[in-house]
Image: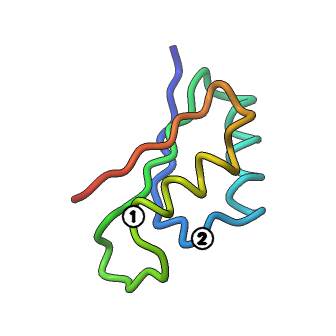
Amino acid sequence: MKVAVYPGTFDPITNGHTDLIVRATRLFDEVIVAVAKDTGKKPVCGIKERVELAQVALGDMPRVRVVPFEG
């Protein structure tokens, strides 16, 4: 099984992000969108909201999983 991890702040998730994710689903069996909690940036939205927004934007893609991460 080929798995890709796409890390980022996704603050907010954009059409550019979703385009890359759609393309990745053609190459990988699963794409994990890893939403970063602490990056040194000052995000507009909190981690919970960014994860929820990404889940809504990517909800129709069964091989995509959105997870928060730290570190």
Residue nearest the viewer, comparing 33 with 4: 33
Image quarter for residue 40?
A: bottom left
Left or right: where does residue 20 sit relative to residue 10? Answer: right
Q: Secondary structure at mark 1?
A: helix
Residue at x-position 77% and y-position 62%: 15
Image quarter for residue 11?
A: bottom right
Left or right: where does residue 40 sit relative to residue 46? Answer: left
Query: Is the residue marked by circle 1 packed among few (<14), some (14-19), or many (20+) residues within 10 Å?
Result: many
Residue 70 image offset from top left, x and y in percent: 25, 57
Residue nearest the viewer, comparing 3 with 52: 52
- The residue tagged 1 is 47
Residue at x-position 41% and y-position 59%: 48
Image quarter for residue 23?
A: top right
Tell me whether circle 2 and circle 1 mark residues in contact (CB < 8 Å): no
Q: CA distance from mark 2 to mark 1?
A: 10 Å
Q: What amino acid is found at the position of numbered circle 2 in the picture?
A: Pro
Q: Quadrant of the C terminus?
A: bottom left
- The image shows a total of numbered marks equal to 2
Residue 12 image offset from top left, x and y in percent: 60, 70
Query: Is the residue marked by circle 2 packed among few (<14), some (14-19), or many (20+) residues within 10 Å?
Result: some
24 is higher (above) or lower (below) than 62: below
Residue 28 image offset from top left, x and y in percent: 62, 26
Which labelled disc corresponds to residue 12? 2
Residue at x-position 37% and y-position 50%: 68
Residue nearest the viewer, comparing 33 with 12: 12
Q: Secondary structure at mark 2?
A: loop
Left or right: where does residue 27 sit relative to residue 29? Answer: right
Residue 20 image offset from top left, x and y in percent: 71, 51
Q: Earlier in the sequence, mark 2 or mark 1?
A: 2
